[in-house]
Image (cartoon, helix red, strand yellow):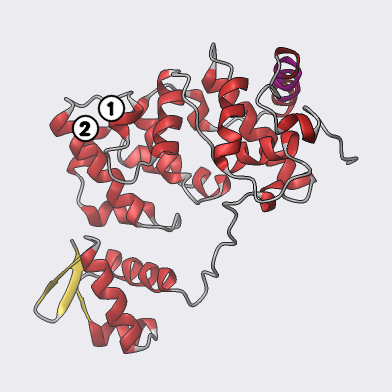
């Protein structure tokens, strides 16, 4: 695919008036034009149900879409609404979460459901400020939920959106901060349909990663993900998977079954207890 440049020239992009009405119109036409032909049909895009959208946004944190597609509908079948998730045993929630990784998100999601039930009469708030007070929800996730579930014209950046703006407005720069990008996100936002606009931006960003050298390498926030193999994250995942199906278990049993070094295992068991995953009774551990 031949590389083409869309948007203002790099020098223009550094000026406050870079996003002129003409440039904004052309940029939106480019993004919507691609989306109209190549937009992805994802299950969470076919609903306005705040609970369903919340589940998808928590699942999609640091996780590829294909992995989420394999779990999303199954999770909703097991926990179709806030009351079901709030009341479920943590062991069952973790069992249905298996394969998505970053298991603390499962705990956060259940705590969100419990708080929605106890403090908000079963209705997820639409306010970004309020959503950021929930566990596991930062500013970007809160803004995405507000836009996708409630059609609020929020302004946020995630990895695919960042890629689009770097590619289109900052081609000759390095170490581009989100603070430089956010004003352009705000000025180019389709306030009449923020939900569809962000879907379109994300899909264009996915295409850029596939067809071009990843523009996000120019971001000041770019970091390579640390290897999973041999990491503490892998160890914790192994422990949780075992205890989800074979609880309770002692340290010797886990060492024998998982083939882990005792020191590494004990360090991660302490962390899992601290994070609320496990409880210890006598010499055995179980899901909290």
SS class of the residue under badge 1?
Answer: loop
Residue 112 vs residue 216, the one in the foreground: 216
Sort mark 1 into few (<14), some (14-19) or many (20+) by Cα contacts within 10 Å: many
Query: Residue 273: where, in percent of width, then height?
Result: 21, 67
Real-space Cα distance between discs 1 and 2?
6 Å
Q: Which residue in the protein does label 1 denote? A: 124
| Magenta stretch encompasses residue 27 | yes
Furthest toward the front, the residue is 15
The residue at the point 75 percent across, 13 percent down is 22
Q: Which residue corresponds to the image point at 51% horizontal and 69% vertical from the top-left?
A: 228
174 and 205: which is toward the camera: 174
Tag 1–tag 2 contact (CB < 8 Å): yes
**Is residue 40 positioned above or below 32 on the image?**
below
Residue 233 location, x and y as percent? 42, 68
Quadrant location, the C terminus:
bottom left
Question: Which image quarter: residue 134?
Answer: top left
Q: Is residue 221 left or right of residue 277?
A: right
Which one is earlier in the sequence, the residue at label 1 or at label 2?
A: 2
Provide residue 166's location: percent of width, then percent of height: 69, 40
Residue positioned most to the right: 2
- The residue stretch that appears in magenta: 24-32
Q: Residues within 10 Å of mark 2 (few under 14, many from 20)?
A: some
Q: Which secondary structure class fits the magenta region best?
A: helix
Secondary element at tag 2: helix
Residue 116: numbered disc: 2
Q: Is 129 in front, or is 93? A: 129
């Amino acid at each position: 695919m031949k590389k083409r440049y869309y948007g203002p020239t790099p020098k223009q992009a550094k000026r406050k008036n870079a996003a002129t009405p003409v440039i904004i119109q052309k940029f939106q036409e480019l993004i919507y034009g691609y989306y109209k032909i190549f937009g992805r049909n994802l299950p969470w895009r076919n609903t306005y149900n705040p609970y369903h959208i919340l589940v998808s946004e928590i699942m999609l944190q640091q996780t590829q879409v294909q992995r989420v597609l394999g779990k999303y509908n199954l999770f909703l079948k097991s926990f179709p609404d806030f009351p079901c998730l709030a009341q479920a045993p943590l062991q069952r929630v973790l069992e249905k979460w298996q394969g998505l990784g970053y298991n603390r998100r499962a705990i956060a999601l259940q705590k969100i459901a419990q708080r929605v039930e106890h403090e908000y009469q079963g209705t997820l708030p639409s306010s970004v400020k309020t959503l950021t007070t929930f566990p596991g929800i930062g500013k970007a996730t809160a803004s995405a939920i507000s836009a996708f579930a409630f059609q609020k014209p929020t302004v946020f950046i995630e990895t695919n959106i960042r890629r689009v703006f770097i590619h289109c407005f900052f081609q000759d720069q390095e170490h581009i901060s989100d603070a430089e990008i956010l004003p352009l996100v705000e000025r180019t936002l389709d306030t009449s349909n923020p939900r569809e606009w962000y879907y379109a931006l994300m899909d264009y960003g996915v295409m850029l990663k596939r067809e071009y050298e990843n523009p996000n390498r120019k971001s000041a926030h770019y970091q390579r993900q640390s290897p999973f193999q041999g990491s503490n994250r892998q160890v914790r995942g192994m422990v949780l998977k075992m205890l989800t199906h074979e609880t309770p278990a002692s340290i010797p049993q886990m060492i024998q079954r998982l083939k882990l070094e005792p020191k590494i295992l004990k360090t991660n068991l302490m962390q899992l207890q601290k994070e609320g995953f496990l409880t210890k009774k006598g010499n055995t551990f179980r899901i909290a």
